[in-house]
Image: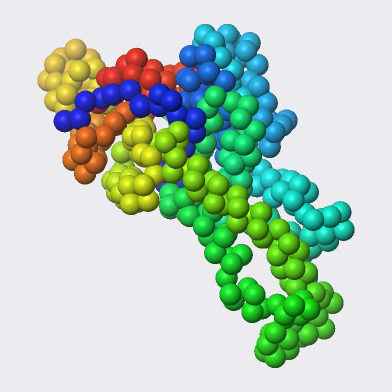
Amino acid sequence: MTETVDLPLEGKRTVICAGSGGVGKTSTAAAIAMGLASRGMRVAVLTIDPARRLAQSLGLEELGNEARRVEPERFARAGVEMRGELWAMMLDAKRTFDELVERYAPDAAARERLLGNRIYAQVSSAVSGSQEYMAMEKLNELDAEARYDVLVLDTPPTRNALDFLDAPSRLSRFIDSRALGALIRPGGRLLGRGSNLLFHALKRITGVDVMEDISEFFAAFADMAQGFRDRAARVDALLSGPATAFLVVTSPQPDAIDEAIFFRRRLAERRMPFAGVVVNRVHVHPGGLDGSVPRAELGELLGPELGGKVARNLEEVSALAARDRASVARLEHALGPAPIVAVPHLDDDVHDIAGLAAMNEFLFGEREDAR
Ligand SMILES: Nc1ncnc2c1ncn2[C@@H]1O[C@H](COP(=O)(O)OP(=O)(O)O)[C@@H](O)[C@H]1O
Ligand SMILES: [Mg+2]
């Protein structure tokens, strides 16, 4: 059995919490960021779609896309000693995309044209895909600014953890694709009789000149293509660099464990720096029972009715604990020697600083009784 070890985050400047949807990536990212900050570092966490109360308790509700410092009093109130600084932000993909255009458009006219373009409006506010890509852009920007000792990155709630890894290269491929080049002639007109007819029909019916918008969109984009390509290459290098750590977050559910194993292999194939697995929401055997519930004793102590209820309840939790223990064992077997940290299923949702502190007792190895 692998030893439970602290997560090897020493010397890391970028920590990425990846995993399938709903396993606790956002909570883990926020907890790790807070843990590192409390130890004296200046940390920024980029969260994506945190629970409303968590956003509130980090002071994120008013300001999303800009990093803001979580006020020291908030930690003091929750009994957390904060020796460093925690900065938090919530990704706004649309806003990030607009800022990119504002920064990199060749001139004011091109900028206005693109921001007002209907195709751009669709592409930039599409939730799937653009979120992954914009998380990368934001990471790139924060890394280049170099204002923080550590960046902790939450990842979008995609079903497939790998979508996120592929975002930079997907965009480069899209920009470079010959199909795209073939779509527009140098004059900015779309080729192809079939599509022309279609667009004319659309224009007649809707009054909207889709073709105009499309060619304008691609023409404007072409001006900025090199910049997108460069940043995609930079972020790819950042992701595989020695100062980056990928933490795979999973729940003990068998399908999430499968995906964690798969994701870890893909990280290895792509030579991306894997730091360990966080198994979150693990059920533990109640009070040292280790699976066997003393039904008779409970009956004697509490009477047959209440005793029976308590016994059934304990048996349920024990069954979950046994299942989770088997899941963690399977994970250990599949990964070989690798840091695995278990965080128990807490009684409360993780919706505030106290909740993050509760996770940190396990994430930072102060308690190891979650398995
Ligand atoms: N260890 C835990 N114990 C209890 N509830 C948890 C735990 N970790 C996360 N949660 C809760 O589970 C839900 C999903 O967590 P979240 O971090 O938002 O997951 P993700 O970002 O992967 O979708 C949230 O309501 C959160 O408060
Ligand atoms: Mg999330």
**Where residue 20 appears, x then y in whole percent?**
42, 46
Count the marks: how many?
A: 0
Residue 100 position within the rendered picture, expressed as x and y whole percent measured from the top left: 71, 48
Q: Nearer the viewer, residue 143 or 214?
A: 143
The relative height of residue 114 versus residue 364 in the rendered view (above or below) is below
Q: Is residue 26 visible?
A: no
Quarter of the image containing the N terminus?
top left
| Res 293 → quadrant | top left
Residue 181 pos. (x, y %): 64, 75
Residue 13 horizontal/vertical position (percent): 49, 30
**Residue located 59% across and 26% down the image:** 148
Q: Is residue 149 above or below residue 50?
A: above
Q: Residue at x 21, y 44 (%)?
A: 334
Q: Nearer the viewer, residue 15 or 194?
A: 15
Q: What residue do we see at 19% from left, 12% from top?
A: 301
Q: Nearer the viewer, residue 21 or 275?
A: 275
Within the image, what quadrant is residue 78 found in? Answer: top right
Q: Is residue 32 visible?
A: yes
Q: Residue at x 61, y 30 (%)?
A: 146
Q: Compared with residue 275, is residue 93 higher up or lower down, i.e. above or below? A: below
Q: Is residue 191 shown above or below 15?
A: below
User: Position of 60 compared to 18: left or right?
Assistant: right
